[in-house]
Image (cartoon, rainbow, N blue to C red):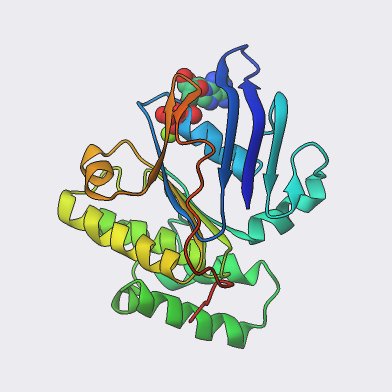
Amino acid sequence: MIQFSHVSKTYDNQFEALNDIDLFIDKAEFVLLTGESGAGKTTLLKHIYMEEIPSVGQVFVCGYESKYVRRKDIPRLRRKLGIVFQDFRLLYDRNVFENVAFAMRVTGVRERIVKRKVWEVLAHTGLSHKSSFLPSQLSGGEQQRVCIARAIINSPLVLLADEPTGNLDTAVSLEIFSLLQEINSWGTTVVVATHDDHLIKRYHYRQLVLHGGVLVKGGNQSIKPKTWKEPQWSL
Ligand SMILES: Nc1ncnc2c1ncn2[C@@H]1O[C@H](COP(=O)(O)OP(=O)(O)O)[C@@H](O)[C@H]1O
Ligand SMILES: [Mg+2]
């Protein structure tokens, strides 16, 4: 599903953010990407959604290969992925419903289907009663739920979440995490970048540990779920 082969990334200012990364993440896995601030977690996620292309090596994601991917293929790749950004990137002048609907409308789906699906996803993420609220009228945990709702609206094969519990207290973090676990239980591959020690210790998921751009643990050992099926999107 996701593979990195000898990936190094040197940014334009000559800073090497990733150094010779090899990793494999299987379908329906749940992995934690950990490491200190500045270790390269966000950079690694950006390579999965091909916002960044390696300076050396190759990234393979859902049948796309970084070496040969064309700019016009990238939106099609992103449609297979759900991305929860560290800085939310919500549309602050639109309400919750519109934020989630927008992500589906851009795929050209008929409005009737968009409406039905948005209501389903909002119910699932516990946001039905906040559908007409603007992001600024929500708590941090609720804003994060909107980001997750928007990320799953197109039934992705892979969900990437960058520090999804970043500014949340422990109880709310656990709620967000159980939502991610539920999404994983439908067969979606989930990759969570976090430096939240509390969560890392609490859940015994496979850890990919980055340190100064080097993957110091977890790269090639993929834990295959016992029974893997195509994602069973109930939404
Ligand atoms: N566009 C960029 N240009 C130059 N250096 C960058 C860029 N983006 C990130 N970096 C550097 O790469 C390192 C890793 O950053 P990042 O991937 O954001 O780490 P993390 O998400 O683990 O905190 C940091 O030292 C950061 O300053
Ligand atoms: Mg980061």
> Who's the residue at 70% across and 44% down the image?
60
Q: Is residue 209 above or below residue 25?
A: above
Q: Is residue 116 above or below residue 181?
A: below
Q: Could you tell me residue 136's position as x and y percent?
A: 32, 56
Q: Is residue 199 left or right of residue 189?
A: left
Query: As rendered, which of 140 and 75 lies closer to the eye?
Result: 75
Q: Is residue 1 above or below residue 52?
A: below
> Who's the residue at 69% across and 33% down the image?
53
Q: Residue furthest toward the front?
A: 226
Q: Could you tell me residue 196's position as x and y percent?
A: 27, 39
Q: Is residue 152 left or right of residue 87?
A: right
> Who's the residue at 30% across and 43% down the image?
166
Query: As rendered, which of 61 and 113 lies closer to the eye?
Result: 61
Is residue 35 among what the camera can see?
yes
Q: Is residue 36 above or below residue 13?
A: below
> Who's the residue at 38% across and 61% down the image?
180
Q: Could you tell me residue 109's position as x and y percent?
A: 67, 78
Q: Quadrant of residue 39?
A: top left
Q: Could you tell me residue 113's position as x and y percent?
A: 60, 85
Query: As rendered, which of 209 and 90 lies closer to the eye?
Result: 209
